[in-house]
Image (cartoon, rainbow, N blue to C red):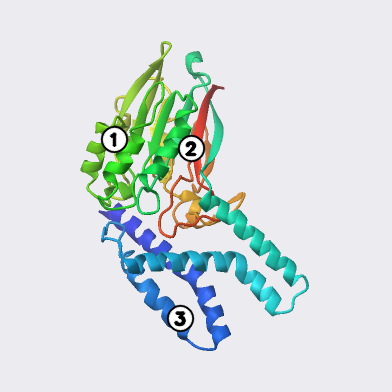
Amino acid sequence: MLIRSFHQGRFQLVATALVTVVQLPAVLWLCALTRTPLPALVALGVSWPYLRRLKSPWTTTPRTPSTYVALGWWSACLVFDLLMLPAALAIHAGAPGGATWALVGTLSLGVGGDAVLNRPRLRRRTVRIAGLPEALDGYRIGQLSDVHCGAHVPEAKVAGWVARLNELGLDLVTVTGDLIAHGPSHVEAVARALGGLRAKDGAFACMGNHDYFTDGEHLVRELEWNGLSVLRNRGVVVERGGARLYVAGVDDTWSSRHDLERALAARPEGVPTVLLAHDPDLFPQAQARGVELTLSGHTHGGQLAVPGVRRLSLARFMTRWTSGMYRRGRSWLYVNRGAGTTGPPVRLGAPPELAVITLRRE
């Protein structure tokens, strides 16, 4: 319960930061333009129904029209604050090149929109592992994370991501948590879509915090019925050409269901390990236990970030492991930015992705 309380407090901190960073500049600017407090009153009235549902990440109250209005308002504020507000201020102040700044803002809006409207990018990374058996040299692992199937991510979209991974002829495919947005409405849909994943050595999944914003047991049953192996504090041995690979998964950290010791208990001595852990904060523990590769998600790369500078993203409110590849000694971590979104359905500077990790001998 202590860990759960810690994560819940951190969740509320992120929500508060979003209100301050995303809404406040736009609201103040509109109040200054209109010389009335009306924009602030409208913002409060629109946002309050949504913010009430952010008191706890375990609250699964149904979405109402007011929450969708709030999501739209947040998205508009986000784009306005980051891209159009600086240009508007430059023009208003008569700054040299104000028109140029406006053009840059407009073009940036198009680039930012690319991350929302277009399909996830395919990221290819190589991980070099000392002592990797020759039969596993070139072994390719696909990763899909943070699907968030729901109102903004329908079954057909998830099926499209599945089809893209299937086209690659992967050796193994993984899904690293947060398969649904919340509630029971899309459990069967996401299970059907992810059940289409195909790889030579199978498809494996771990649970994320959003996967318990509904009946987690029901979700697991549906996933396994459709052909996925859900690794909840356990692992399996995969064999290829006489070589072995241990594939393990841990359960959700936010609700304190994770148990890394149990997940690694059946690991054969000297066998390289791939760990599915939705929360990247488990990486130091995995590294201390000699796990060669940890695949995580959870952060979405912040959904709002400065391109190319992963320290400058909203994910820094959650973790130091914001996105991409990290290495400590012999251990690697890959933090997938995910394919879906949560909260406002907007990404800027943190485009969605699918990943393929290739294992190589070091």
Estimate the spatial distance between the alpha carbons at disc 1 and disc 2, rounded to whole Å: 18 Å
Mark 3 burial class by Cα count in 10 Å: few <14, some 14-19, many 20+: some
Q: Earlier in the sequence, mark 1 or mark 3?
A: 3
In the drawing, does residue 321 fall left or right of residue 228? right
Type of amino acid under label 1: Asn
Task: List the residue tagged with mark 2.
Answer: 333
Q: Residue furthest front?
A: 156
Q: Is mark 3 on a helix, strand or loop?
A: helix
In the drawing, does residue 157 fall left or right of residue 95? left
**Disc marking residue 40:** 3
Task: List the residue tagged with mark 1.
Answer: 233
Mark 1 burial class by Cα count in 10 Å: few <14, some 14-19, many 20+: many
The one nearer the camera, 158 or 302, is 158
Q: In this view, does 327 lie above or below 79?
A: above
Type of amino acid under label 2: Leu
Q: Are marks 1 and 3 in contact (CB under 8 Å)?
A: no
- The image shows residue 133 at horizontal and vertical percentages of 48, 16
Q: Is residue 345 above or below residue 297?
A: below
